[in-house]
Amino acid sequence: MLAVLVLLAGLLDNGGQQNRSRLPSATAPPRAGAQPPQVSPLPGGADPAATSRPQRQLSDWAENFSDELNIPMAALEAYGYAELALERTRPDCGLSWSVLAGVGAVESGHGRYGGSDLDSTARPEPPIRGIPLDGSEGVRLIRDTDDGELDGDTVYDRAVGPLQFIPSTWRDWGRDGDADGVADPDDLDDAALAAGYYLCDSGSDLRRAEQFRDAVLRYNASGEYVQQVLDHADDYGKRSRELLRKQ
């Protein structure tokens, strides 16, 4: 289900205030997913002469879980690579790829919302766009901030890509996750890394229940959304570890 109304910036008419009356009651964070193998290079040390996306180094690992978890291989590669990158740059955060997968599941079904398919470079085709943020009932008013460059709308902003960044948020948090020289919210490699840094901002430790919830609430100010991400992330973490034990 595409969460087009409250994406990364609190887009509901509550002005981004956290709806704590509907917070999930879980007392533990989601279980971490099966650890991806260490690869190199990672963001910050990527080889600009590389001929393919570095996330492809995780193809064997992703293939172990893709069908069972119903997550496209390119998406798993992107999530796993983002975990490894944040493990290097923000080890205090404890980000697991399963949390990013939980976000990706809720936001766009891992780039498959509305009949889109995620290709082998981790881009949905056709691209995914949210509704115009035009101030209609239940929708926050955000007038165009990017001259339509990212979202194709020169009147209002729209959420963009498989993780549904709005243009102003992407301006602050966008990352080039695959070292192709472009930070692109339509590229899940880039969006997953950006979402990881966003979730890990302000010293969050996602291994702690309260900090996990607060981080996801910053991503989307809805208790229902937090519960959906938690449920998906916990399921992915549990099942991936069970699959790994059976191999």
Image: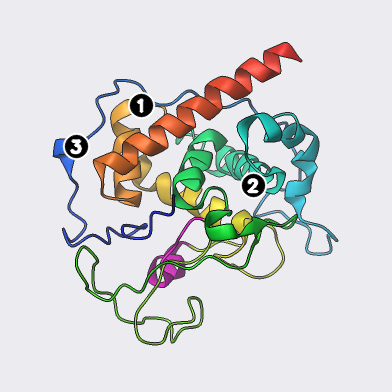
Magenta residues, start to end: 163-173
Instruction: Check contact, mark 2 vs mark 3: CB within 8 A.
Output: no
Q: Position of residue 168 (x, y in %)?
A: 39, 71
Which residue is at a point 41% across and 27% down the rendered structure image? 207
Q: Is residue 67 above or below residue 31?
A: below
Q: Residue at x 54, y 20 (%)?
A: 238
Q: What whole-number distance in Å separates the C-alpha atoms at marks 1 and 2?
A: 25 Å
Label 3 Cα neighbours within 10 Å, binned few <14 / some 14-19 / many ≥20: few
Q: Nearer the viewer, residue 191 or 40?
A: 191
In space, the residues marked 2 and 3 are separated at their CA atoms by 30 Å
Asked whether, in this view, residue 116 is left or right of residue 143, the answer is right
Q: Nearer the viewer, residue 69 or 147?
A: 69
Q: Is residue 141 magenta?
A: no
Of the image marks 1 and 2, the number of the one nearer the N terminus: 2
Location of mark 3 (residue): 22
Q: Amino acid at mark 3?
A: Arg
The residue that disc 2 covers is: 75
Question: Observer-nearest residue: 213 or 105?
Answer: 105
Q: Nearer the viewer, mark 1 or mark 3?
A: 3
- What amino acid type is highlighted by mark number 2? Ala
Label 2: which secondary element: helix
Q: Is residue 63 above or below residue 2?
A: above
Compared across the picture, whether 114 is left or right of 198 comes to: right
Disc number for residue 208: 1
Q: Amino acid at mark 1?
A: Arg
> Residue placed at 76% from the left, 44% from the top?
40
